[in-house]
Image (cartoon, rainbow, N blue to C red):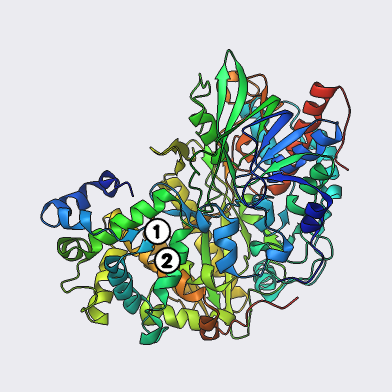
């Protein structure tokens, strides 16, 4: 347990209004100005700005309130308490494992701090295809700048850990440009435990920035409380029905409460936001709801080095290359971004393919193992329509994301690119994470083998930590669920403020895109509701 | 726990219908979110094959409590699917027809279990692949969530702060 000050526990002592879970039961009926569903990137920014404007805000979070004093840097604590479905959320065919936060702060509490503005080419594509006028670099720049200042986002100037430096060195040998990643940290201890909750509060997640700011201004936070459905009639939302949940998400019988607000903001993330609207039977005249959900499907390549890598240690993901996003047109073959993720025992053992003595050999080399990942940029080609969020019989969401040949062809090129970089960096052997691959000891051997691998779901290991889309915003009603200002096309007192708005994937780790864009939307919403100008500062 | 057999698809439905469906129905792999004896038999056997070369024989039984903890955190739909899967794998027709294992999980040798795991792993039937991956991921997560297993990885654990 961390012995450092814990701003969340201090806030609770100061009298923050928190209900649900271990705190006082939420009243059966709550009336407020605005209810915000979720407490992650979009929700945090929105709650911060709306409380600045003087609005009475209630934040509804399905997960628990955990903070630095709870963060022991143990995967066995972190996955069940901080992640959706104990970090084992899967697509319908179980071919993609999805890492998504489910705690106060949402995914920002557990992400690896990588911060990129929305790429210019992504914004161009949105303007051309989704009529999102005004979503250009210059117009968005002030909103990104404010978010960067608020969350201390800056290029990481410390030397990268060995896991990341291998990407830098391997890419350099091949003439591939690589650069340092900006991170949202203040006084980072370089521990490498970002994915288990930051024990030093260096990570400027929503948990320690915007949510505390909103609570200090009198907002109410309901934890371990699921937004079940909106009551909708005559083109308006009339209430939000909530239910208390157990740690595994099971509803507690007899725990229902209703929140009545002037305005409703849905920011539950790009699987749960569409699910709330589906459960609510929200109008969807053009069949957009839950469709075009994107994941940046990730394929991985492990390498063994002579020297110790200790991939658990030091800032994760501090070096990247976008070279392979720019070798093709954006709507051509699938591009990908390369990064080097943190390595910890549970995630490594459950991700590395194989079993028995073969796997034991790979595990034994854990300390010398370097891993690269490729984020595949989905959503820009007719054969990349992403997935669809549907509801199971019990109302829980399920994402059906078919890994078709177009996507998997990108995966093959990514495995090739990563293996070549890893050999250039001095790898003794490279193991593409695929059930039919074996460790290869030279680039020509790996190249020939990867060309021969069947790139099929469930044989190729595919994971994701970036869920986007499903409630796209667009400048024409037929193209999306929300208007360019984030307001639902058919429900005038409902806004959507999270990554579900994105009509394609971002092509970069999405947290700063969510911060910047929802900053703009929330400022406009605050003005509409109060007439006041507020900025993120 | 609600049992939704349709989720398991036509292949396993046929296996169960051939004999053993009713047996599996009354022998779920989980009860109240914890492994039943059937569930322990399957995980115990699978772990012997999966962790061969990593874990000692006396490290298998302690896995059950850690798997229980892990399963408790899963949502109800995932617990339901896992319970059905374990019931299928434990039933004689499921074990033979679905997992490809002739002898019970508790009696089969490590090479026999590994042959069965490998046949599921590279099967053309996606449900068999899913079953392999569920066993692989849960056993690996349960084993390496324990600090005692970290020495094998030369992982020192988190820095004290």
Q: In the rendering, which numbered label is found on residue B68? A: 2
Nearer to us in this view, A477 or A421:
A477
Whether residue A367 is situated above or below residue A190 in the rendered picture:
below
Give the secondary structure at mark 1.
Answer: loop
The subunit letter for the residue under badge 2 reads: B
Q: Place residue A474 in its image quadrant.
A: top right
Nearer to us in this view, A269 or A157:
A269
Residue A114 horizontal side relative to residue A399, left or right: right
Q: Place residue A233 in its image quadrant.
A: top right
Residue drawn 42% across the image and 66% down it: B68
Mark yes or no: residue A352 visible: no
Whether residue A141 is situated above or below residue A439 in the rendered picture:
above
The quadrant of the rendering that contains the C terminus of chain B is bottom right
x and y percentages locating residue A155 in the rendered image: 81, 59
Residue A500 horizontal side relative to residue A58, left or right: left
The subunit letter for the residue under badge 1 reads: B
x and y percentages locating residue A333 in the rendered image: 52, 46
x and y percentages locating residue A286 in the rendered image: 50, 21
Residue drawn 49% across the image and 35% down it: A382
Q: In the rendering, which numbered label is found on residue A406? A: none
Marks 1 and 2, the one that precedes in the sequence: 1
Cβ atoms under marks 1 and 2 closer than 8 Å:
yes
Mark yes or no: residue A49 visible: yes
Q: In the rendering, which numbered label is found on residue B33? A: 1
- Dot 2, crowdedness within 10 Å: few (<14), some or many (≥20)? some
Whether residue A527 is situated above or below residue A15 in the rendered picture:
above
Residue drawn 23% across the image and 59% down it: B27
Give the secondary structure at mark 2.
Answer: helix
Whether residue B125 is situated above or below residue A378 in the rendered picture:
below
x and y percentages locating residue A220 in the rendered image: 74, 40
Q: Place residue A31 in its image quadrant.
A: top right
Q: Alpha carbon of mark 1 to alpha carbon of mark 2: how far?
A: 7 Å
């Amino acid at each position: 347990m961390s012995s450092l000050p814990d701003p969340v526990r201090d806030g609770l002592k100061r009298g923050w209004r928190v209900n649900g879970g271990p705190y006082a039961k939420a009243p059966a009926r709550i009336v407020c100005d605005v209810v915000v569903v979720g407490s992650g990137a979009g929700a945090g920014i929105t709650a911060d700005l709306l409380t600045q404007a003087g609005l009475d805000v209630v934040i509804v979070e399905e997960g628990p309130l955990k903070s630095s004093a709870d963060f022991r840097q143990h995967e066995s604590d972190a996955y069940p308490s901080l992640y959706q479905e104990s970090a084992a959320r899967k697509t319908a065919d179980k071919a993609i494992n999805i890492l998504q936060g489910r705690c106060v702060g949402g995914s920002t509490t557990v992400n690896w701090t990588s911060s990129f503005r929305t790429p210019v080419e992504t914004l161009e594509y949105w303007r051309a295809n989704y009529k999102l006028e005004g979503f250009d670099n210059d117009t968005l720049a002030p909103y990104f700048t404010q978010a960067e200042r608020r969350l201390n986002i800056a290029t990481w100037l410390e030397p990268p850990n060995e896991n990341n430096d291998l990407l830098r060195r391997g890419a350099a040998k091949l003439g591939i440009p690589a650069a340092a990643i900006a991170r949202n940290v203040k006084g980072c201890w370089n521990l490498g435990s970002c994915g288990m909750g930051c024990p030093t509060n260096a990570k400027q997640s929503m948990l320690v920035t915007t949510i505390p700011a909103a609570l200090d201004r009198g907002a109410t936070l309901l934890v371990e409380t699921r937004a079940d459905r909106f009551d909708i009639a005559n083109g308006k939302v009339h209430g939000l029905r909530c239910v208390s949940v157990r740690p595994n998400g099971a509803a507690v019988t007899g725990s229902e409460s209703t929140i009545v607000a002037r305005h409703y903001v849905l920011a539950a993330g790009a699987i749960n936001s569409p699910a709330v609207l589906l459960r609510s039977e929200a109008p969807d005249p053009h069949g957009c709801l839950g469709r075009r959900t994107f994941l940046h499907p990730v394929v991985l390549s492990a390498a063994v080095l002579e020297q110790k890598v200790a991939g658990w240690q030091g800032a994760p993901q501090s070096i990247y290359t976008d070279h392979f996003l720019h070798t093709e047109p954006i709507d051509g073959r699938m591009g990908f971004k390369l990064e080097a993720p943190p390595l910890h025992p549970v995630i490594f053992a459950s991700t590395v393919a194989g079993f028995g003595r073969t796997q034991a050999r790979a595990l034994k080399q854990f300390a010398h193992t370097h891993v690269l990942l490729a984020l595949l940029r989905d959503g820009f080609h007719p054969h990349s329509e992403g997935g669809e969020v549907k509801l199971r019989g019990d109302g829980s969401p399920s994402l059906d994301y078919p890994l078709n040949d177009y996507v998997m062809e990108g995966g093959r090129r990514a495995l090739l690119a990563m293996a070549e970089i890893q050999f250039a960096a001095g790898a003794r052997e490279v193991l593409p994470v695929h059930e039919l691959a074996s460790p290869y000891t030279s680039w020509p051997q790996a190249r020939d083998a990867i060309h021969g691998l069947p790139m099929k779901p469930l044989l190729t290991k595919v994971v994701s930590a970036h869920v986007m889309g499903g409630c796209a915003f667009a400048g024409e009603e037929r193209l999306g669920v929300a208007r360019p200002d984030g307001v639902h096309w058919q429900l005038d007192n409902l806004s959507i403020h999270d990554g579900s708005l994105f009509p394609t994937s971002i092509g970069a780790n999405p947290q700063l895109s969510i911060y910047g864009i929802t900053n703009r939307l929330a400022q406009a919403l605050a003005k509409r509701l109060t007439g006041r100008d507020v900025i993120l500062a | 726990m609600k049992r939704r057999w349709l989720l398991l698809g036509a292949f396993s439905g046929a296996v169960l219908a051939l004999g053993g469906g009713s047996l599996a129905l009354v022998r779920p792999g989980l009860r109240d979110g914890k492994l039943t004896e059937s569930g322990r038999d399957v995980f115990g056997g699978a772990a012997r094959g999966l962790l061969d070369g990593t874990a000692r024989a006396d490290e298998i039984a302690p896995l059950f409590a850690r798997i229980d903890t892990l399963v408790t955190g899963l949502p109800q739909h995932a617990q339901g699917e896992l319970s059905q899967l374990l019931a299928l794998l434990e039933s004689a027709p499921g074990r033979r027809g679905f997992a490809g294992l002739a002898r019970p999980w508790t009696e089969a040798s490590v090479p026999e279990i590994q042959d069965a795991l490998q046949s599921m792993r590279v099967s053309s039937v996606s449900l068999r692949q899913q079953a392999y991956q569920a066993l692989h991921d849960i056993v690996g997560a349960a084993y390496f969530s324990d600090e005692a297993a970290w020495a094998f990885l030369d992982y020192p654990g988190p820095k004290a702060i």
